[in-house]
Amino acid sequence: MIKKNLQLLISALVVVGAALFYGASPGNLLPFLFDFDTQNTDLRNILRAVMGLYLAFSGFWIYALYRPAYWRTATLSNALFMGGLGFGRLISFILDGYSEVYFPGMLLEFGMMAWALFNLKKA
């Protein structure tokens, strides 16, 4: 595997896991871990829409591993995706307060964004 592809591969694997966590069975897993009810149809719809979005981006990143013509676009979309998650968490920390659970995730998201931007600059 080409070294610059490692960032996309890791991102895709992690984001597929997150997608399945949010959307595969929101009524069973999320209430157990986060102590909130997901019996509402509208909330389940939102969670499954997030799952679809995550799977679509992950699929594109994996596709770009095999189609080099799409590598730059996939890497840029990955930087935007990871940066968007990280900045969203940062805004939540500012407005809602610190979360020990999600702070490491925010750092990793910013790290993946930086890695993607670094790879783009090198290419």
Image (cartoon, rainbow, N blue to C red):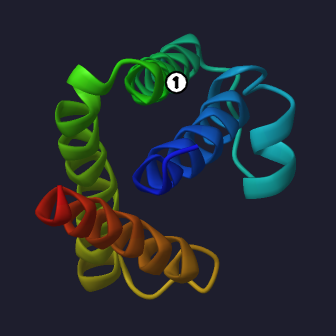
Quadrant of res 17: top right
Q: Residues within 10 Å of mark 1 (few under 14, many from 20)?
A: some
Indicate left or right for 121 with 65 as reference: left
The image shows residue 65, relative to residue 12, as above or below, that is above
| Residue nearer the viewer, 56 or 100 | 56
SS at circle 1: helix
Does residue 72 lie above or below 117 as drawn? above
Q: Residue furthest front?
A: 2
In the picture as drawn, the residue positioned furthest to the left comes out as: 121
- Left or right of 104, for residue 119: left
Q: Is residue 30 left or right of residue 74?
A: right
Residue 114: image quadrant is: bottom left
17 relative to 52, above or below: below
* Horizontal and vertical percent position of residue 31: 79, 43
Q: Give the residue type that dot 1 points to.
A: Leu
The residue depicted at 69 percent of the width and 47 percent of the height is 36
Residue 46, image x and y in percent?
Answer: 45, 22
Quarter the N terminus occupies: top right
Q: Tell me which residue sits at (58%, 51%) in the image.
A: 10
Percent across and percent down for residue 106 are: 43, 74
> What residue lies at 44% left-to-right and 80% top-to-bottom?
107
Along the line of sight, the residue nearer the viewer: 112 or 1:
1
Look at 45% across and 88% down and name the residue there.
98
Q: Quadrant of residue 33?
A: bottom right
Q: Which residue is mark 1?
A: 43
Quadrant of the frame with the C terminus: bottom left
Task: Measuring from the top left, give residue 43's x and y in whole percent.
Answer: 52, 24
